[in-house]
Amino acid sequence: MSVSFLAGFIDPLAVHCEEAIASHKEALDADAEPLDLIDHYLGRIEKESSESDSPSGFAGSDGHKNLLQVTSELFAVGGATISTALHWALLYVVLRPDVQARAREELDRVTGMKRPPSLEDR
């Protein structure tokens, strides 16, 4: 895999993370409990930035850059985990005809062979 191939994924991921951070900044209530990692991180950035002698990585523009890095890495790692799980599940089904048959029977029973399955079938 070339570096240029991987670089094609980095910019859209960074843009998505920047948008998520901006959305959280707009909705952030300093008095409320943080709802997720980004809220908590933004709260720490605010706290550490107000302390002028803070050597923390949360302070100033470093805080935002670090938050962007953390969120980008979490999205990337989460995508890799999902991809790996789907690969193993597909391999398992391919190698186990009995599992394929049971899955087909369940799909036919639920959908009546008249339509593709949907989330409403849960």
Image (cartoon, grey):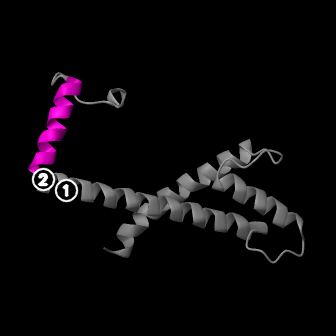
Q: Residue at x 65, y 68 (%)?
A: 66
Relative image position of residue 86 (x, y in whole percent): 29, 54
Which quadrant does the N terminus fall into?
bottom left
Residue 58 occupies which quadrant of the picture? bottom right
Does 103 appear in magenta? yes
The residue carrying mark 2 is 96
Task: Work out how far the residue at label 2 is from the one at label 1, CA to CA, in angstroms.
Answer: 6 Å
Q: Does dot 2 land on a helix, a strand or a loop?
A: loop
The 10 Å Cα crowd at callout 1, few under 14, some 14 to 19, many 20 or more, is few
Relative image position of residue 105 (x, y in whole percent): 15, 33
Classified by dominant secondary structure, the portion drawn in magenta counts as helix
Residue 72 occupies which quadrant of the picture? bottom right
The residue carrying mark 1 is 92
In this view of the protein, which residue sits in the foreground, 8 or 88? 88
Q: Does dot 1 land on a helix, a strand or a loop?
A: helix
Kindly check if marks 2 and 1 are in contact, taking CB atoms under 8 A apart as contact: yes
On screen, residue 50 versus residue 43, left or right, reads right
The 10 Å Cα crowd at callout 2, few under 14, some 14 to 19, many 20 or more, is few
Task: Say which amino acid is labelled 1.
Answer: Tyr
Task: Say which amino acid is labelled 2.
Answer: Arg
On screen, residue 35 versus residue 2, left or right, reads right
In this view of the protein, which residue sits in the foreground, 4 or 101? 101
Q: Please report the bounds of the magenta region as a residue range.
A: 97-111
Does 89 appear in magenta? no
- Residue 83, visible in the rendered structure: yes
